[in-house]
Amino acid sequence: MSDLMAEIDQRANLAYSNEMEMLTFYLTDRQLYGLNVFKIIEILECPKTITRIPGSHPAIRGNIDFRGHAISLIDLSQALGLAPHDLERELGYVMVCEYSTTVQGFLISHPNALIHKSWNDIISPTGDVYDSSYLTAITYEKDQPIQILDVEKVLSEIIGIEDRISAELVQRSSALQARTHHILAVDDSRAARQLISSALDQLNIRHTLFDNAAKALEALEQSVARKDAVCPYTLILSDVEMPVMDGFTFTRKVKANPRLAHIHLAMHSSLSNQSNAYKARQMGADDFIPKFQPDRIAGAILAQLEKADQAHKARQ
């Protein structure tokens, strides 16, 4: 296991060329699943001591100690509606992951291997069967399917995610100029799109959501296709991890277009550590906002829209 973690540490610092490094693992259905290594802090054998939490979601097996701190242990199989992991009969492993400044442990059957994938090889599933599923993407390795989970949806349903904006920020949004602001947001996670939409609805700000960065980039480029066209978007909000085109590539392409480069672009990600914020800036992003912190998201958006209003007044 230490060799596996050493390899994760070695590969995690990938050049941002629309590629990712994925850890594949098994759950109780013996199917293969995948998770970006950037989310993984450590993999360890499941501790013997698990402290039960009365009244918690059934998929939360309890708390475990991780480096002197109690973290929730979520049975990922049970969270997906599969048979729970039988820790009395089988050894389990814990993927300790960081999501939006919080740390959780995900109980899995066992890790499999590290694979290197281009985001072009990662497919967004389509069809009614996927609309309510926990899948965000699918890829293949030697013809074997690998299911990439919408872990943000899992967390939103198990732990719950606050989406209410503070009254102070809602009041602040009412002071924006009457002229229409329009925000473009792109995120492949249904849970994240719902949070973004809820926040912007509370602020009464018009927005267009995309589940795919390639589609979002096409919409942006079409909006300025005519020589006299002015891009209608005041701000762009982009996830990092997305099938087909990741957020770093999307950001680089937007900022490389002289007719789009002036638009304030904030990356919005559950990959919330400082190294990812730094890398987002390297790609040209103007801001980096951790996911699932509605007031922080709203505050960053309002600050930029207020600057846009001030610039508009100065030009009049």
Image (cartoon, rainbow, N blue to C red):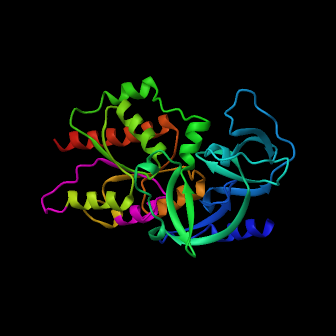
Residue 242 in the image: state x and y as whole percent.
46, 59
Q: In the rendered image, which quarter contains the C terminus? A: top left
Magenta stretch, main secondary structure, is loop
**Most extreme residue toward the left, as rendered?**
228
Name the residue at 85% across, 47% down.
88
Residue 231 in the figure: left or right of residue 297 = left
Q: In the rendered image, which quarter contains the N terminus? A: bottom right
Residue 211 in the image: state x and y as whole percent.
39, 53
Residue 119 in the image: state x and y as whole percent.
47, 67
Quadrant of res 180:
top left
**Most extreme residue toward the bottom, as rendered?**
142
Residue 89 in the figure: left or right of residue 85 = right
Residue 304 in the image: state x and y as whole percent.
36, 43
**Relative to 138, residue 271 above or below:** above
**Number of numbered labels in the structure image:** 0
Name the residue at 70% across, 53% down.
28
In this view, the residue in front, 125 or 119, is: 125
Q: Is residue 235 visible?
A: yes
**Most extreme residue toward the right, as rendered?**
48
Quadrant of res 123:
bottom left
Residue 214 in the figure: left or right of residue 190 = left
* Extent of the magenta region: 225-253
Q: Is residue 18 visible?
A: no
Name the residue at 56% across, 59% down.
147
Residue 179 in the figure: left or right of residue 91 = left
- Indicate yes or no whether the magenta region holds residue 238: yes
In this view, the residue in front, 281 or 160, is: 160
**Relative to 241, residue 167 above or below:** above
- Indicate yes or no whether the magenta region holds residue 209: no
